[in-house]
Image (spheres, rainbow, N blue to C red):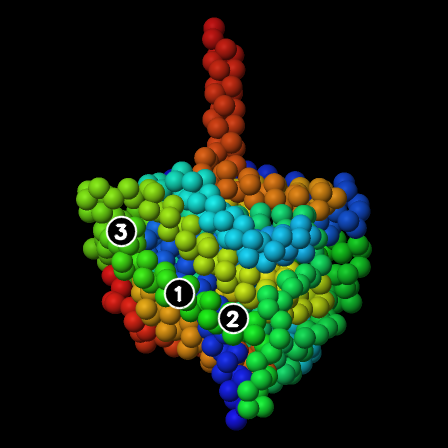
Amino acid sequence: MKGKSKYPLAACILIGLAIVLPIVVRERYFVTIAVQFLVWVAVAQWWNYLVGNARIFSMGQIIFFGIGGYASAWMCLTFGLSPWVGMVIGGFAGAAFGLVVSLPCLRLRGIYVALFTIAFLIMLQKLFVQQPLEPFTGSTEGLLGIPHFGIGPLEFQAFNRVPYYYLILGITSASFFALSRLINSKWGLAITALGDSETYAKSLGVNPVQTRILIFSIAAFFTGIVGSFYAHYSSVIGAGIFSIEMTIYYFVIMTIGGLGKREGPFLGALVFLVFYQLLAEWGPYRFIVLGVLLVLILTRMPSGLSTIVESAKVALMRIIQSCLHKLMRP
Amino acid sequence: MTETLLVLEEGIELGAVFALMAMGLALIYRTVRFLNFAHGTTFIISAYLTWYLISSVGLSYPLGVAVALCVAFLFGAAIELCILRPLRGKPEFELTAIIATIGLIFIGENSIRALAGSRVKMIPEMVTGNLLYGGISLPFQRILIIVVSVSVLLLVTLFLRKTKQGIAIRAIHQSTDVAGLLGINVGRMYLYTLGIGSILAGIAGIFLSALHTLSPGAGFEPLFMAFIVIVFGGIDSIEGTLYSAFLLGIVKSFAATYLGIGWGDVILFAFMTIMLIFRPSGLAGRRIE
């Protein structure tokens, strides 16, 4: 494990490309799509780690996304804080909720986590439109006019919102590297060990409940930050953010990409983006195709599209090797 | 007093529909060891089919319902054949099966949207007229729903206790391996269980949509209720599921009337959380693990 690179080369190349991209493509539409895509990747990579690697069957990461957004928006609107501070608060609010959610359900078997988190999600959707909570949630209207990010006098809305693109690119990359670090840390290894054999890991002194609660809260923290970004980016937030629809979208993204694979959320989000945005004129049919794809991938190719990438990588290596052989031959 | 009685009646009616939904879910979970997220999809497909057969094709009510329930049975069997069979035996069956059924929700909801449109539909009333008694006016349809639901629940309980197939299904719950050794065709029993569970969801779907309206995403709400009911009642226990369905139905009805519509769900969720914290095995369940 020690010798493995913490920052995979491919990720660095992709991020480099992503930095150059807005200079080449100068359309507002592009920024909208790219921000959406990066938000998906940012949330899905932690979710995917929870479901695919840590065996915590959370169906409610959207909770922390929404809570992060609401917390940050409310703080900024009420106390006039800067969105940058709001984002940190959003992250911690997400983590706090992660802790609250994990306490009743992580002691129990996998199925209860799914049941509890999804029920919690729907409950929040109902709760946040209730009258008594109006000062915090703005009731059915939601919170409007959430301040935009900015540095000094420069508002991020300007320049076709390109600064927003760079901000979410930064958040997504940072959380990617944070996840890489976590996977190689003591806690990440404990999670891997728990996945291989819970009994054996326990005998080595791993505390399963503690480890899972910790991982869950960290994931909630990063999801909360992304949620807060999203709230300031769209400048409105309503109870509709706690959406089942989105939960299903994320499961499609994670499964098509490959559950438990690092590159999965990226590939899945890419495929989903193509269907969601570019094939929009297909109407509901595009989702039917995606649903069928999901079932097929689960039953025939459990590692999803990452299998294809994996075999492409192997093929590429073989070609390079044979080329080198030919060159080296005297 | 009259109002309280009416709210109570609504609670019982809600409880009956919850019970149908949750019993199907619990039956499938106990036997097949998998949480059927597509249960809400079965619910909504049967309801839409009934609407289509009665309103557009012009079948009579009983015939339309019968066809819709047959389709529900086939849908349940298809879940077993197309999704669970290929996944069973592979690692993480419980997880992958759930995700696959999430895919089914996606397919089902969007198929309905593609075929029937997103506009809200109404199933015509099953029976017209009201029961008038002592100042209370109660539609016959609601009485019919309660009576039929309770009889169906009784029938299913009898089926599980008395018939050969029912006993086989319960045997599989106790131990799949031993049941197989005793000559029970486990695969076929899985098919039956999913089919019967789906029929129950289908009946719930038709009843609830006769009372309310139909929209492509309407299957999720009852699924969520059924989740709360089975967790509260004990995921492994049929009796617990029945008690908790009626209890929670009445609680929801009172909370929604006296506190406001949205509070019903919030309070049910609180009930479930308290149960999970203090007695994770539920109302009537045994100790877990």
Q: Secondary structure at mark 1?
A: helix
Q: Which residue is mark 3?
A: B164
Are labels 1 and 2 on one chain? yes
Disc with the residue nearer the chain's start (1 vs 2): 2
* Residue closer to the observer: A325 or B271: B271
Q: Quadrant of the N terminus of chain A?
A: top left
In three-dimensional space, the C-alpha distance between marks 1 and 3, rounded to whole angstroms, equals 18 Å
Chain holding disc 1: B
Residue A141 coordinates in the image, percent (x, y)? 71, 74
In three-dimensional space, the C-alpha distance between marks 1 and 2, rounded to whole angstroms, equals 14 Å
Q: Which residue is mark 2?
A: B144
The tag on residue B153 is 1
Q: Residue furthest top?
A: A330
The tag on residue B142 is none
Q: Amino acid at mark 2?
A: Leu
Quarter of image, res B200: bottom left
In three-dimensional space, the C-alpha distance between marks 3 and 2, rounded to whole angstroms, equals 30 Å
Residue A64 coordinates in the image, percent (x, y)? 53, 65
